[in-house]
């Protein structure tokens, strides 16, 4: 494995160990993170998001990763998060494709892709099945995720 592949492996190993501090060390200070649940987060928001998600999981989170590929500029990986969604206590198995851009030996851009409808069916049951594919419902998910992050940041 090259250095950027090792960096991705370090990130997901730390994630699996609920170690948001080591995860944050893998990121460039100017990190941009994008995913369907939170939209765009920048810099310190990203580390706080991982800290919040790990603290809310209360140790009930399983992370698996595979297919790590990287060159000196960009990389990718597949990962699976298995956890109980805190709002409904329903089990979610979220399959994610991650893309990375590197700068100065660190991750400067991290983009996670996953099927929001599949996620919402697991997280919200029948409501997610009926509405999870709509922009309205996805907007509500993002608004709630950002509000949760804001409240978490204010509590620290």
Image (spheres, rainbow, N blue to C red):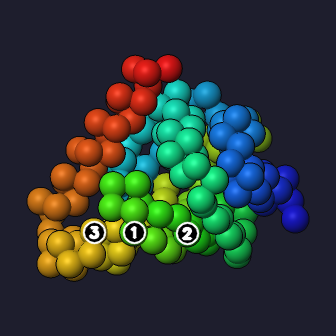
User: Residue beneath label 2, please?
Assistant: 82
* Residue identifier under label 1: 90
At mark 3, the secondary structure is helix
Q: Which residue is mark 3?
A: 124
For marks 3 and 1 on the same chain, the one whose residue lies earlier in the sequence: 1
Element marked by disc 1:
strand
Mark 2 or 1, which is nearer the eye? 1
Q: Position of residue 65 (x, y in %)?
A: 68, 69
> Which tag, 2 or 3, sits closer to the chain's start?
2
Q: Residue at x 35, y 28 (%)?
A: 151
Relative to residue 18, is residue 130 depicted above or below? below
Label pair 2/1, CB-CB below 8 angstroms: no
In the picture, measured across the screen, residue 37 lies left or right of residue 125, that is right
Which one is nearer the viewer's eye here, 89 or 15?
89
- The image quadrant of residue 136 is bottom left
Q: Nearer the viewer, residue 66 or 76?
A: 66
- Check if mark 3's residue and mark 1's residue have beta carbons within 8 Å: yes
Label 1 environment density (alpha carbons within 10 Å; few <14, some 14–19, many ≥20): some
Q: CA distance from mark 2 to mark 3?
A: 15 Å
Q: Position of residue 45 (x, y in %)?
A: 47, 31
């Amino acid at each position: 494995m090259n250095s950027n592949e090792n960096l991705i492996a370090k990130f997901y190993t730390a994630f699996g160990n609920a170690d948001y501090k080591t995860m944050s060390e893998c990121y460039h200070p100017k990190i941009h993170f994008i995913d369907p649940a939170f939209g765009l987060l920048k810099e310190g928001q990203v580390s706080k998001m991982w800290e919040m998600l790990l603290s809310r999981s209360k140790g009930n989170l399983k992370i698996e990763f595979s297919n790590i590929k990287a060159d000196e500029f960009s990389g990718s990986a597949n990962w699976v998060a298995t956890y109980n969604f805190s709002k409904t206590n329903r089990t979610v198995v979220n399959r994610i494709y991650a893309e990375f851009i590197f700068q100065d030996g660190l991750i400067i851009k991290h983009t996670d892709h996953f099927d929001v409808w599949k996620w919402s069916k697991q997280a919200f049951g029948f409501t997610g099945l009926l509405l999870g594919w709509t922009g309205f419902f996805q907007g509500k998910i993002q608004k709630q995720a950002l509000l949760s992050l804001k409240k978490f940041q204010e509590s620290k």
